[in-house]
Amino acid sequence: MPPVTIYWRPMCGYCETLKGDLTAHGVDYETVDIWADRSKAEIVRAATGGHEIVPTVQIGDRFLINPSADEVVAEARAA
């Protein structure tokens, strides 16, 4: 499975849910707090048409915007 990166920010319930669901699915992932590292927020804006929508998940060169854990698992397996 290719690396999975979750771009998130504090106090995002959707982000916490996704991280918990991916852990339950046994998916390893890295997290990037776009409030702590503002340079990484640009990656999210580029992927979302200028918005800071989180969670944004990167798998290889693909981005998923606010995906479910099932979508992340399917995309990671297909990559």
Image (spheres, rainbow, N blue to C red):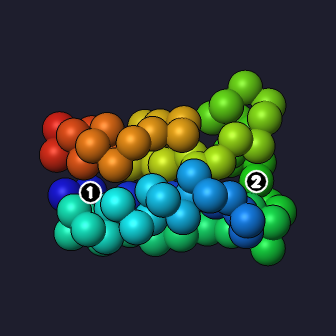
User: For the residue marked with disc 2, what is the amino acid?
Assistant: Ala
N-term mark: 1 or 2: 1
Query: For residue 62, which quarter of the picture?
Result: top left
Q: What residue is shown at x 24% (from left), y 48% (from top)?
A: 73
- Secondary structure beneath dot 1 equals loop
Seen from the viewer's position, the closer of residues 70 and 64 is 70
Residue 20 image point, x, y percent? 40, 67
Compared across the picture, whether 78 is left or right of 44 comes to left
- Secondary structure beneath dot 2 equals helix
User: For the residue marked with disc 1, what is the amino acid?
Assistant: Pro
Q: What residue is shown at x 31% (from left), y 38% (from top)?
A: 71
Q: What residue is shown at x 44% (from left), y 65% (from top)?
A: 19
Compared across the picture, whether 8 is left or right of 23 comes to right
Residue 39 image point, x, y percent? 79, 61
Q: What residue is shown at x 57% (from left), y 52% (from top)?
A: 14
Q: Tell me whether circle 1 and circle 2 mark residues in contact (CB < 8 Å).
A: no
Seen from the viewer's position, the closer of residues 72 and 4 is 72
**Residue 79 seen:** no
Residue 37 image point, x, y percent? 77, 70
**Residue 50 seen:** yes
Residue 12 image point, x, y percent? 68, 58
Report the residue that reaches farthest toward the top: 49
* Circle 1 Cα neighbour tier, 10 Å, few/some/many (<14 / 14–19 / ≥20): some
- The quarter in which the N terminus is drawn is bottom left
Compared across the picture, whether 21 is left or right of 16 comes to left
From the image, tell me which residue sits under label 1. Answer: 2
Query: For residue 2, which quarter of the picture?
Result: bottom left
Seen from the viewer's position, the closer of residues 46 and 68 is 68
- The quarter in which the C terminus is drawn is top left
In the depicted structure, whether residue 2 falls above or below residue 51: below
From the image, tell me which residue sits under label 2. Answer: 41
Q: CA distance from mark 1 to mark 2?
A: 22 Å
